[in-house]
Amino acid sequence: MKHLSDIEIIDSINRGNISDYTLLVNRYKDRAFSLLKRLLRNEMDAEEALQDSFLKAYNSLSGFRRDSQFSTWFYRIVYNTGLSVISSKKRKIELEMSSIDDHFDLMSHDNEVYSTADSSRQYILKMVDKLPVRGALVVILFYMDGLSLNEISQVMGTSLVNTKVLLHRSRNALKDLLLKHNYQEEML
């Protein structure tokens, strides 16, 4: 079976082959779930939001304009669904990067995080989770999911300049966390 593009799958679904939607679900479920887990910090909430996201995407599929990639459009739905879950539970969303003083509070559990990590990749991901939500998301979307800055700005609903600044600040905050924990010494 040849590898179908997202557009080919969408065209098939729009022609009435609704079972082809499972191809899109299987293609994007893991990355979307990962994004939601980081955003919501609760696995059960993430599972519910993921189901809602796929349902919203399916119901809006005929309106997909193809002026961006399907993945960007879908991640936007996922991100907005996650934000809706947060606001419905009346959680506060961190809109600005926290000051470096806030990162000192995050350092208290670094030894525990490192001791429970099986690999350096897992350790770094746990440290990314210590970043503010928006900072962690931009790092994950850029480095793990391979989205461009332009796509990330569309997903997060921010300007390209703000997305670049957020990524820069998040990288610096992650670097500070790793250096404060002497991560380099642990790797030697």
Image: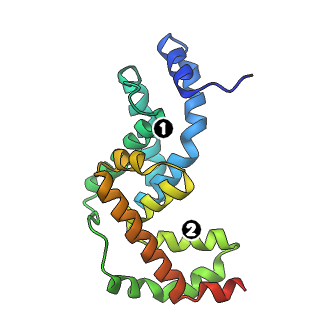
Q: Which mark is residue 50?
A: none
**What's the residue at 38%, 40% (across, down)?**
77
Read off the residue under disc 1. Answer: 71
Callout 2: 10 Å neighbours few (<14), some, many (20+)?
some
**What's the residue at 49%, 55% (across, down)?**
142
Quick one: 159 or 70, which is closer to the camera?
159
Which percent across, then down, holds residue 116?
65, 78
- Taking the image as shown, residue 105 lies to the left or right of residue 99, namely right
- Taking the image as shown, residue 163 lies to the left or right of residue 8, namely left
**What's the residue at 37%, 60% (across, down)?**
164
Which percent across, then down, holds residue 169?
38, 71
Secondary element type, mark 1: helix
Read off the residue under disc 2. Answer: 125
Give the answer, above or below, for where 132 lies relative to 157.
below
Where is the N terminus found, in terms of image quarters?
top right
Which three-letter amino acid code belongs to the residue tagged 1? Ser
**What's the residue at 50%, 46% (across, down)?**
32
Give the answer, above or below, for where 102 lies relative to 131.
below
Where is the C terminus found, in terms of image quarters?
bottom right
What is the basis of the colouring in this image?
rainbow
Give the answer, above or below, for where 94 lies relative to 46.
below
Secondary element type, mark 2: helix
Which three-letter amino acid code belongs to the residue tagged 2? Leu
Q: Toward which corner of the image does residue 163 lie, by quadrant?
A: bottom left
Which percent across, then down, holds residue 59?
38, 25
Q: Are marks 1 and 2 in contact (CB under 8 Å)?
A: no
Which percent across, then down, holds residue 154?
35, 44
Give the answer, above or below, for where 130 lies relative to 166.
below
Q: Earlier in the sequence, mark 1 or mark 2?
A: 1
Q: How many marks?
A: 2
Return the residue found at the far top: 15
- Taking the image as shown, residue 62 lies to the left or right of residue 14, namely left
